[in-house]
Amino acid sequence: MSAFATLGGGCFWCLEAAFRPLRGVLEVTPGYSGGHTLRPTYEEVSTGTTDHAEVVRIAFDPREISYEQLLDVFFAVHDPTTKDRQGYDVGPQYRSIVLYENEAQKDAALRKIKALSGLFKPRIVTEVKPLEHFWPAEPEHHRYYDKYPQDPYCQAVIAPKVGKVVQRFWPLLK
């Protein structure tokens, strides 16, 4: 039994690496969503003109990890208060976004944002919108952190996010 969550919060390499070690997560696929271009490429999305965000599509077993727990991890590993930016990654492709597949996911995301709103200053700017299309990223973007752990970007940006997941969400690890 599997369900899906589609989330964007900066570079998809970061989110993929952060969600992969969680119990109940079956697969994490980096890709693009939320824009108007059909079958966008990394180069097109990187221009910021396609309106797509870099996202991950998480296949998960809801008997082992809930959508709400995935949202907890999501909001812990990125800054939901910066519009079109995560650290040095700047542009609309790096925005914070929850793409829901049903009303239950939409309601869960809105409840989570409301619950967290008093903890974040400035305010949370995470978009919540229906998933229309998900376009998988090119193969070279899949499991990037696993393939290049010594890359400076992986060391400086991705490794701390993975470390945060391991430290803060250790009961959810595989």
Image (cartoon, helix red, strand yellow):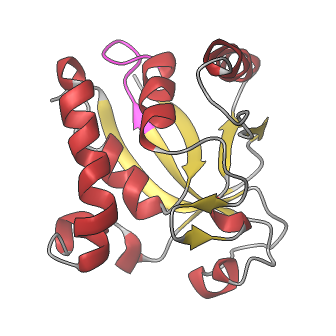
Compare residues 37 and 7 and report the one nearer the observer: 7
Question: Is 171 situated above or below 52?
Answer: above
The percent position of residue 52, horizontal first and vertical second, equals: 73, 65
Quadrant for the C terminus in the image: top left
Compare residues 48 and 174 and report the one nearer the observer: 48
How many numbered dots are placed on residues in this image? Answer: 0
Which residue is at 62% across, 81% downward?
41
What stretch of residues is rendered in magenta? 59-66
Mark yes or no: residue 37 visible.
Answer: yes
Question: Is 42 situated above or below 157?
Answer: below
Residue at the extreme front of the image, as rendered: 121
Which residue is at 38% across, 49% downward?
28
Q: Is residue 81 magenta?
A: no
The percent position of residue 97, horizontal first and vertical second, equals: 68, 45
Mark yes or no: residue 143 visible.
Answer: no
Dominant secondary structure (helix, strand or loop) of the stretch shown in magenta: loop
Residue at the extreme right of the image, as rendered: 36
Which residue is at 32% across, 74% downward?
153
The percent position of residue 99, horizontal first and vertical second, equals: 69, 40
Compare residues 11 and 122 and report the one nearer the observer: 122
The percent position of residue 115, horizontal first and vertical second, equals: 64, 12
Quadrant for the N terminus in the image: top left
Q: Is residue 62 magenta?
A: yes
Indicate the quadrant where residue 48 lies.
bottom right
Horizontal side of 134 relative to 147 (left or right) equals right
Which residue is at 19% across, 35% downward?
166
Horizontal side of 25 relative to 74 (left or right) equals left
Horizontal side of 95 relative to 4 (left or right) equals right
